[in-house]
Image (cartoon, rainbow, N blue to C red):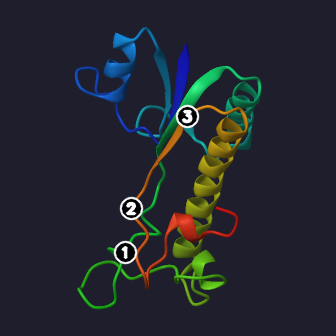
Amino acid sequence: MAFLSLYHGLARPNDGIEHFLGLYGANLETYDLEISDSHDLADDGIWSQIRDKLESGFFAGGGGGAPCSTFSAGRSWTDGGPKPLRGEHPPELYGFSNLWMQDKESVRLGTLLALRKADMLDILYTQQKPGWAETPMRRDGHPSVFKLPGL
């Protein structure tokens, strides 16, 4: 039995989810750029292979984090931290219009990866399999991956 974890970070073999799934004889297939360049979930070819395995029913469940740095409520105009890149609601949820090109690319990539995570969860839900999403809770006045239309 195999589970899928996206945006997993580095393995934690002694106390991570892979350890606890292993206690029950299950495997965890993990994807994160911190692990390998071959785990680039923005790459259409890599995503297609993962999606094919999802649709075939290969995974018993899945989840994980999602890159949320561009959605973070920690980005604020008032505390000297990094400036916000998104508004709370569309169209600003997809990025403010006055962003630098590098920030626009960060927002585009963050949106793509969040939607791929939602796609995974939708497939698992349709198959009536468990899925989890690790992301900061929704907060009024701030962007959130959960505020993307359709999520």
Circles 2 and 3, Cβ within 8 Å, touching? The answer is: no
Residue at far front of view: 128
> Horizontal placement of 126 versus 116: left or right?
right
Calculate the distance from the C-alpha at mark 2 to the C-alpha at mark 3: 20 Å
Count neighbours of disc 3 (C-alpha within 10 A) and say few if under 14, some if 14 to 19, many if 20 or more: some
The secondary structure type at the circle numbered 3 is loop
Calculate the distance from the C-alpha at mark 1 to the C-alpha at mark 3: 28 Å
Q: Mark 3 points at which residue?
A: 130
Residue 79 in the image, given as x and y percentages of width and height: 23, 86
The secondary structure type at the circle numbered 1 is loop
Calculate the distance from the C-alpha at mark 1 to the C-alpha at mark 2: 9 Å
| Relative to 136, residue 102 above or below | below
Residue 73 in the image, given as x and y percentages of width and height: 37, 74
Q: Identify the image quadrant of the C terminus.
A: bottom right
Q: Mark 1 points at which residue?
A: 73
Q: Earlier in the sequence, mark 2 or mark 3?
A: 3
